[in-house]
Amino acid sequence: TSMSLYTNITINITYEIYTKRGSFRGLGLDSWQLLASGSVIGAGSGVGTHIPSKHFLQHRDRNNSMTTIPPNTIQGFYVTFTTNDMNHDQTSMSEGEIMISNNDIDVLVGVGVPDYPAGATLSGPREWRGQ
């Protein structure tokens, strides 16, 4: 398990990554499962800031299985910094449209969440800026 996030800063940043089955729409943050959290040094503009695999929690989901994404399943992700330092790109694509795809996964256009922790305000559509 790994992920990289984009930020312009090169100082210590605190992040949280949540996930849930289905769309990111609806339900409050309490319906999300914390997937990873911690602090890392931002890699700066144009470089992915790697989230170490040891920061990902090794817990079981509601079905008592390790958190995986079964084939043909929609999985929502909420990725945030505790500050306003994450990069995101506006797009002319529509929310829910396939942004990038390969044989294993489709990444769909989503939205930005300008508040920490997640508030009711969403801004979009936004392209995922990470790996």
Image: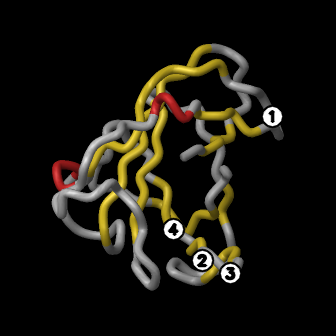
Q: Earlier in the sequence, mark 3 or mark 4?
A: 3
Q: Pointer 3 and pointer 2: residues touching (CB < 8 Å)?
A: no
Q: CA–CA distance between discs 3 and 1?
A: 29 Å
Residue 89: x, y in percent?
68, 57
**Residue at the spot of label 3:** 103
Measure the alpha-carbon separation of dots 3 and 2. Answer: 8 Å
At a point 59% along the width and 71% down the height, the residue shown is 107
Say what secondary structure mark 2 lies in: strand
Q: Residue at x 31, y 38 (%)?
A: 117
Q: Secondary structure at mark 1?
A: loop
- Callouts 3 and 1 close, C-beta under 8 Å: no
Callout 4: SS: strand
Location of residue 21 in the rendering, given as x and y in whole percent from the top left corner? 31, 68
| Sequence-wise first label, 4 or 1 | 1
The one nearer the camera, 75 or 70, is: 70
Q: CA distance from mark 2 to mark 4?
A: 12 Å
Farthest front residue? 65
Q: Which residue was labeled with disc 4?
A: 110
Identified by mark 4, the residue type is: Gly
- Image coords of residue 131 (percent x, y): 67, 52
55 horizontally vs 30: left or right: right
Residue 80 in the image, given as x and y percentages of width and height:
46, 40
Residue 45, numbered label: 1
Q: Three-letter amino acid code at disc 3?
A: Asn
Distance of label 4 from label 1 (alpha carbons): 22 Å
